[in-house]
Image (cartoon, rainbow, N blue to C red):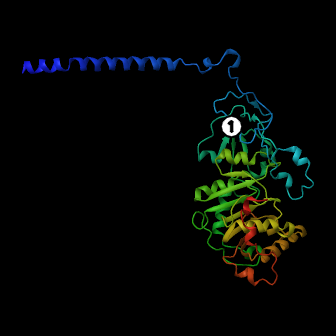
Amino acid sequence: MGISINRVLNERKYPFIFTLLLLLICVTILLFTNKATSTFDPTSFYPDDVKPQPLQHSSSSPLRGETFLLDANIHWKLCKTPDYIPCLDNMKAIKALRSRRHMEHRERHCPPSTPHCLVPLPIGYKLPLPWPKSRDMIWYDNVPHLKLVEYKKEQNWVVKSGDYLVFPGGGTQFKEGVNHYTKFIEKVDHHLASHNLPKLYTLPAIQWGKNIRVVLDAGCGVASFGGYLLDKNVITMSFAPKDEHEAQIQFALERGIPATLSVIGTQKLTFPDNGFDLIHCARCRVHWDADGGKPLFELNRILRPGGFFAWSATPVYRDDERDQKVWNAMVTVTKSMCWTVVAKTLDSSGIGLVIYQKPTSSSCYQERKESTPPLCENKDRKNISWRP
């Protein structure tokens, strides 16, 4: 046995030594390469006079097709204001408008070149409060605006309380709170006899989170309506223009409520056809009967067949000449669109509400004596919601 082992060692002595030597060489090369990599300076390959310089800020627009180095040392400047929206704060374009009659000044007017500045954070900015706490209160320093607090103090939109802005759930039409208002829409039973109003129909079952899941809230204010509907498994897109009600959409987003800046003006909304189960407007400051009812035609486009339009505004429940003129115009336009009134009533605070329903088929359109408004042609429907 001993003789066999010695014979094997003698026969394999030289290959064994060669293998061991090769292994040592590989380890040495690996250690050297690792050390060299850790101290590698990419600029050492350039002569002192041609080393690459960091990119400097330029006010010119980037060239089409230009590529950017993600690791480039770009020196950005701070924007002059913390609340800057290029396409809505383009004062040069707004001043050049020929008319503001149809809210053109609230629409998007993007500058020809992209601003090269960083919007500074508000002083004292903190991480937002977690949901659902954020629905009812946010840090004041994150959206430091008090104009709306003062302007709407009697309507309980938003209240300043120490380091916080608190949202009690009030609104112009939510005199008893938004929670009461949402329940009123769902459970309204038309106590019309005591209000001397003609009884119409029993409201079809509007069941939040069941047959009503996707809602659009026009002129949403601070979006309390959409915020409370989240508890009822309803997704609401809230929108309002950037106007004298400063920061209303900022408040909504800071609260964690889906919202966007938009306005019903001369351009179509960027929503697809037949998309929403219900569209809501509570004193949203939209003249629905304007231009022969064009704003209502746009609602008709994005409202699904059988969907509802809930409108709470003074023309619904006041008898003065101005409000009645608007109401009569709404009656004319909605009839021409084959919308039916399925509810018209008052709540306990005296606020009126009317709910229209879009037809579920086109049969009514074809039976009209006058084709006004006309039916859209197929060629007009291509990408219609993304074209002005």
Up/down of 365 relative to 90, above or below: below
Which quarter of the rendered picture does the C terminus lie within? bottom right
Q: Residue at x 68, y 35 (%)?
A: 68
Residue in front for this viewpoint, 11 or 182:
11
List x then y, in percent, for residue 5.
12, 20
Which quarter of the rendered picture does the N terminus lie within? top left
Q: Is residue 212 left or right of residue 3?
A: right
Single out the residue that lies furthest toward the left.
Answer: 1
List x then y, in percent, for residue 303.
69, 67
Q: Secondary structure at mark 1?
A: loop
Q: Is residue 266 left or right of residue 199?
A: right
Check disc 1 and report the residue beneath it.
Answer: 67
The amino acid on which the numbered mark 1 sits, given as a three-letter code, is: Thr
Up/down of 95 relative to 338, above or below: above
Residue in front for this viewpoint, 116 or 9:
9
Q: Residue at x 76, y 65 (%)?
A: 298
List x then y, in percent, for residue 77.
76, 30
Kindly tell me whether residue 6 is visible in this rendering: yes
Q: Which image quadrant is residue 90 in?
A: top right
Q: Which image quadrant is residue 166 in?
A: top right
Q: Residue at x 74, y 79 (%)?
A: 365
